[in-house]
Amino acid sequence: MIQPGSRSTLTEALIPPAGYTFDAGIATTYSLDLGTLMTLPLQLAWLAASDDAEAQSDPIRLLEGLRRVAKRLTVFADRGRIQIPRVPHALMGLMEEMICEVQAPHEGAFHPKCWVLRFVADDAERAPCVRLLILSRNLTDDRSWDLNLLLEGRPKGGFHKNNRDIAAFIRGLFGWSSKSIPATRQLLVDSLADDLHRCEWELPAGFEEVQFHVLGAGPKPRSFDFASCDEAMIISPFVTDGAIRAVVGNASSRIALVSRIDQLALLEEGTRKLFSRVDVLNDDADWGREEEVSSDACRGLHAKAFILRRGWWTHLYVGSANCTNAALVAGRNVEVMAELVGRHSRVGNPGDWVTEKGIGSLLLPYSPIETQSILEQKRIEDALERCRQAVVRAELTLDCRREETGYRLTLIGVDRLSNVEAAVWAWPLTVAAERRVAIAKSNDCHSDLGIYAPQDITSLTGFRLQLDGGDLSFGLELPLPNPPIDREAGVLALILRNRAGFLRYLSLLLGEPDDLLPPTAGTEGNDGWFGNSAAGDEGPPIFELLVKAFSRNPEKLGFVASAVKRLEKVEAESGEALVPPEFLKMWRTFEEAKRLGARR
């Protein structure tokens, strides 16, 4: 049974186990916040603790986290559901390769929220660790109440039949992609699916079995059958009459329905009367840390759970599926759920969930409200959603051309937006939304988005729609066949813009995160790379860190070698000076020492 006093964050779930290193991963989400995604590699790469707010805003750590993780993590999101960043950043353009927008095969929503992560042991004799997260939470910075399941296992032996459907789901994700994917990334995801298929899971206390259900991914849409039960309870932020009756229609006792007040108001009265109690989340419930209370991110109920008792056994379904027709009856949405099975004497009954030992302290009885304003808001939202889908289907592309003052970005295909009722604006998501440009829906197929610095050019494009007093903003990744060759150089030059920045970057590569030089350390007036003056009085000298790594942790020199090679390549392509010559001279000495040592 859930205990709301025991809370965790997604970032905590991404930290590798002790003695392990992140190797590969996939995430699926309905909506995607780029700012949240940008910080997650810090945990996967052991570059910051989950509560280290300073590290999560440090561009040098963010840059290195992306460098280590971007080629090994793939994020699948519903097309057109990228959120507009609260704070745009040039680094967001470097995340394009990680992001794969997909479209559900049956004209529904791509709605699953699951992570599969593989960690390899420092000891090669030990098997990899596979971590599976089945979530109700999207990859956003929302402060909503969610319900998430974390399982760990070790791949061994043959395939386990209970893992077949979810492994097949992972293998098939690229088939729904809106863009072509490099073969190396596809092979990495396929190997992850194979290991997932072979895992035996460590289950939560009291549960004896887990099964996985993937909805909306087959050749035809189909409804999900929960079968008859003795007791039933539903927790779902979005609900419809037909889906509720499909879940509890054959239940002997309907314990409780927990949802949002606006959703409950739109149900038929007879549907609400099926349940012994109907509840909403208490707005005054304990929201945890003060900064979460003051956040303007979304709050409220977002957890999804179906708790059924059949005889001696409790079946707990958790995951992405709401109790709606699209998810459970029509079967159009792609959803992933885990079904945990345990004796009710050990894991509780459905009724236990609404007691003080469960989530009872968070709930209030539902009181009827007026529905006219809800219906009007829904009408506007539905109209804007139709406009969003028209933009998604328009197959827009981008073009980038060099000019004297920067790069001109052009949106191509806007003539196909003539059927969009809403007013439309567009802009690259690496810059503030205030730079958006109104799109004239005429016979002209081109729309000029303006001139930008190379580091601001991205395929991630923001759109804003306005219609009938309603407003909707979202992002799309559009084809950009000719990005600037000096785009990466522009990003690196922006972050490593002086010797102090380069010093901090090297300190991160060579030391532990706590050794990272503060932003003010190292100035252009310092004398050399070999003594304390190179790092100022506030951080370790680079030469000493190189010597320490050479003698104790040679793998850290590999990080430096990879970074230097990357920076030199960027320099050759763009002419932008990124590696100080005096460091390069010193670094060649260590490269020669490594080469001689390898011969012995």
Image (cartoon, grey):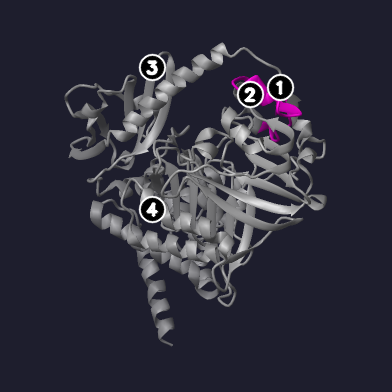
Answer with mark 2 or mark 3, whichever residue precedes in sequence.
Answer: 2
Residue at 55% over, 12% down: 373
Residue 366's mark? Answer: 1
**Residue picked out by circle 3:** 467
Q: Nearer the viewer, residue 43 or 466?
A: 466
Mark 4 vs mark 3, foreground winner is: 4
Coordinates of residue 178 in the picture (x, y in percent)? 33, 45
**Residue picked out by circle 2:** 264
Q: Is residue 287 magenta?
A: yes
Coordinates of residue 571 in the picture (x, y in percent)? 28, 55
Answer with mark 1 or mark 3, whichever residue precedes in sequence.
Answer: 1
Answer with mark 4 or mark 2, whichever residue precedes in sequence.
Answer: 4
Quadrant hosting residue 144: top right
Residue at 39% over, 67% down: 586
**What residue type is disc 4 on?**
Phe
Q: Is residue 413 magenta?
A: no
